[in-house]
Image (cartoon, rainbow, N blue to C red):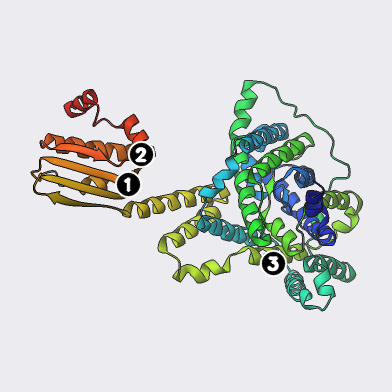
Amino acid sequence: MIKSLKDNWLSNVRGDLLAGIVVALALIPEAIAFSIIAGVDPKVGLYASFCIAVIIAFVGGRPGMISAATGAMALLMVTLVKEHGLEYLLAATLLTGVLQIGAGYLKLGGLMRFVSRSVVTGFVNALAILIFMAQLPELTNVTWHVYAMTAAGLGIIYLFPLVPVVGKILPSPLICIVGLTAVAMYLNLDIRTVGDMGELPDTLPIFLWPDVPLNLETLMIILPYSVALAVVGLLESMMTATIVDDLTDTTSDRNRECKGQGIANIGSGLLGGMAGCAMIGQSIINVKSGGRGRLSTLTAGVFLLVMVLVLDAWLVQIPMAALVAVMIMVSIGTFSWDSIRNLKEHPLSTNIVMVVTVIVVVATHNLAFGVLAGVLLAALFFANKIGHFMIVSSDLDEASETRTYRVVGQVFFSSSEKFTASFDFKEAVDRVVIDLSRAHFWDITAVGALDKVVIKFRREGADVEVIGLNEASATIVDRFGVHDKPDAVDQLMGH
């Protein structure tokens, strides 16, 4: 336990503290913006980001990952807030947490193994594009000062690390934010600041139980939204965990992360916040700023609230151009540039899955739709590919007039037609042996194909023997097959 405490909390104190401060600064305008998207007061997003970050630091399954209010979740709340109000959103947030905890206990985090690398790459690229697109409103219809500040910010971010000694100690995004804020205040530039995004809260969050009727009607109203929020929240969190795993060369406990996200959302809902999940952009900022342990996530949440309550007079002076520069850096760092270079080398199916995932996510602004489309496409391509790796060979023993068919490979819905077409039912033989010792039957479509083959040979007067079924295949054939069940065969042939 002491080793775990040191590894998760005390192994990188300076890096975690500095990275947490950078993340907290970047969280403020995003939390306010996401609140506006959802149609609620900025305080709701800020309280949510504080609560979720602090709670997930203790109960999450991925150290160094940042969770807070997110745009993907905010988009799903718009209709609920508009039609039923904030109280129903808080109730939906609580139910979202319960569903996510349930997903953790059901070990649904393990479903991530069905998400291929091409889907993850497409998801990451789409998110990078969405992060960049989200900055465009801050760069349109503005004065040249904004462009100059943004360019200067990017210059600081990419060049400051080259400065000897100091460049390795202090995170360049933090220097960018502090430096540009000082310049904007000194020159008294008339540019958009964090204070223009909305009013910051001036009190600590308090315990709030949603003021909604506790009946079936309320449940029917919030359930569809809660299910959608739970699914999108877990998808984005699992994807983020995968990316942070790769960046830090460590592993995460996905089922614990599901439970942690649920507990964090329940805490957020009880303190007047909206539902949230892991944030890829902020998590990458954290990692690239030197954050690795749980202390960085805790620092981000605590410092966020401290800044909002104590340093609000300074925070409202931060130019949005500084934060835009940080987010552009995140966008550039998030995008998988290797995926563009590998388009010529990777299989066409892999490229199609990646590109479709990107297109669907960017078009719908819904991460779940993009991932679902990618997973379905990947599954179809995989099934088609595996279906080709099934062959049937045969030889004839003329003395006994016995034709032996040997099946090699996987027999399932994709290869069942090829399996059936591989037999010559018109050949005049007395006996047919179907050797399945090197084959595997996966589903009832495959069993139906075997039934069809055996029954057709018997119709032609041949004696059919099926041999070599492995235990798993024999189980499904015995349960669903009809070729060795006289009554069922008669009924089938009668139809």
The residue most toward the top is 215
Residue 472 at least partly seen: yes
**Marks 2 and 1 close (CB-CB < 8 Å):** yes
Given the image, on which type of amino acid does mark 3 rest? Met
The residue most toward the front is 399
Within 10 Å of the Cα at label 1, are there few (<14), some (14-19), or many (20+) other Cα atoms?
Answer: many
In this image, 66 relative to 336: left or right?
right
Instruction: Return the mark for residue 439.
Output: 1
Residue 141 at least partly seen: no
Residue beneath disc 2 = 473
In this image, 326 relative to 83: left or right?
right
Given the image, on which type of amino acid does mark 2 rest? Ser
Comes first in the chain, label 3 or label 1 = 3
Count of labels shown? 3
The picture places residue 193, in percent across and down from the top left corner, at: 80, 60
The picture places residue 14, in percent across and down from the top left corner, at: 85, 61
Q: CA distance from mark 2 to mark 1?
A: 9 Å
Vertical relation: 340 (above or below) 212: below
Nearest the eye: 470 or 413: 470
Given the image, on which type of amino acid does mark 1 rest? Ala
Residue beneath disc 3 = 329
Q: Quadrant of the C terminus?
A: top left
Q: Which residue corresponds to the image point at 83% horizontal and 48% vertical from the top-left?
A: 200
